[in-house]
Image (cartoon, grey):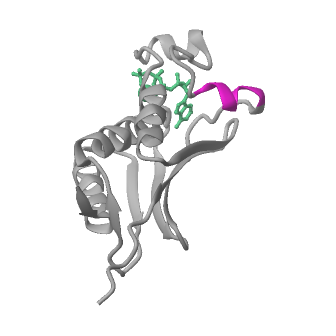
């Protein structure tokens, strides 16, 4: 379906901001212009769910979660940044693998199977998009994904 992406993200974040635990603030940085993406909203909701619940789960001390949407020439990029525990540099590339969890001892108590990001990657790639991570241990993590923009109708 053709979905107006900015409003879609705005609604999803609003729901998360409402349910966020104390000490966590979710901030939106969204473009003012409408942008259209051909996508399955349920699947994109699942992607955002997985990414934002990680940002909350791995930010035990709270902090800001920033959700930024940037329009590029052919793609729209969504970035979710947190100020949480971060990921050691040599492990960042593995977090999209099935069942991979960075620190078994540390994360066991938090629960989870290590599937959230693997599912997100599958769903984004099914939309001809890409997903990647930037992180600094002890400082925070940014998960970004890009989706193809629909071309403007002539008219
Ligand atoms: P599940 O999502 O299946 O409940 P999970 O959160 O452990 O379990 P993923 O969402 O796939 O699994 O994430 C894989 C691993 O990547 C996590 O176990 C965690 O170690 C690390 N990780 C993911 N997101 C973050 C983040 N925002 N900050 C720090 N570490 C993260
Ligand atoms: Mg997860």
Q: Percent x, y for residue 132? A: 60, 43
Residue at point 24%, 49% (across, down): 41
Total marks shown come to: 0
In the image, residue 59 sits, relative to residue 13, either above or below, namely above
x 61%, y 16%: residue? 103
* The furthest residue to the front: 154
Give above or below for 108 relative to 152: above
Compared across the picture, whether 5 is left or right of 125 comes to left
Which quadrant is home to the C terminus?
bottom left
Quadrant, the N terminus: bottom left
Q: Give the image quarter of residue 32.
A: bottom left
Region in magenta: 90-95
The quarter holding residue 89 reads: top right
Q: Residue furthest bottom?
A: 155
- State the predominant SS element of the stretch in magenta: helix
Residue closest to the eye, 94 or 72: 72
For the residue pair 92 and 74, the one nearer the viewer reads as 74
The stretch drawn in magenta includes residue 106: no
Question: Does residue 96 appear to the left or right of 148 in the view shown?
Answer: right
What residue sits 33% from the left and 85% below the top? 154
Left or right: 111, with 92 as reference point: left
Q: Quadrant of residue 109?
A: top left
Q: Residue at x 56, y 28 (%)?
A: 96
Q: Give the quadrant of ligand 2.
A: top left
Question: Is 18 positioned to the left or the right of 58 in the image?
Answer: left
């Amino acid at each position: 379906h053709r979905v107006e992406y900015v409003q879609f993200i705005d609604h999803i974040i609003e729901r998360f901001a409402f349910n966020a635990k104390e000490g966590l603030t979710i901030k939106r940085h969204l473009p003012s212009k409408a942008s259209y993406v051909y996508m399955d909203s349920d699947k994109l909701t699942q992607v955002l769910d997985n990414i934002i619940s990680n940002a909350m789960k791995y930010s035990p001390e709270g902090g800001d979660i920033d959700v930024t949407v940037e329009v590029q020439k052919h793609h729209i990029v969504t970035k979710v940044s947190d100020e949480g525990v971060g990921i050691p540099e040599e492990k960042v590339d593995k977090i999209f693998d099935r069942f991979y969890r960075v620190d078994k001892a540390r994360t066991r108590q938090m629960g989870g199977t290590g599937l959230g990001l693997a599912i997100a990657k599958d769903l984004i790639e099914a939309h001809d998009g890409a997903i990647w991570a930037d992180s600094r241990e002890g400082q925070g993590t940014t998960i970004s994904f890009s989706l193809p923009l629909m071309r403007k109708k002539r008219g």
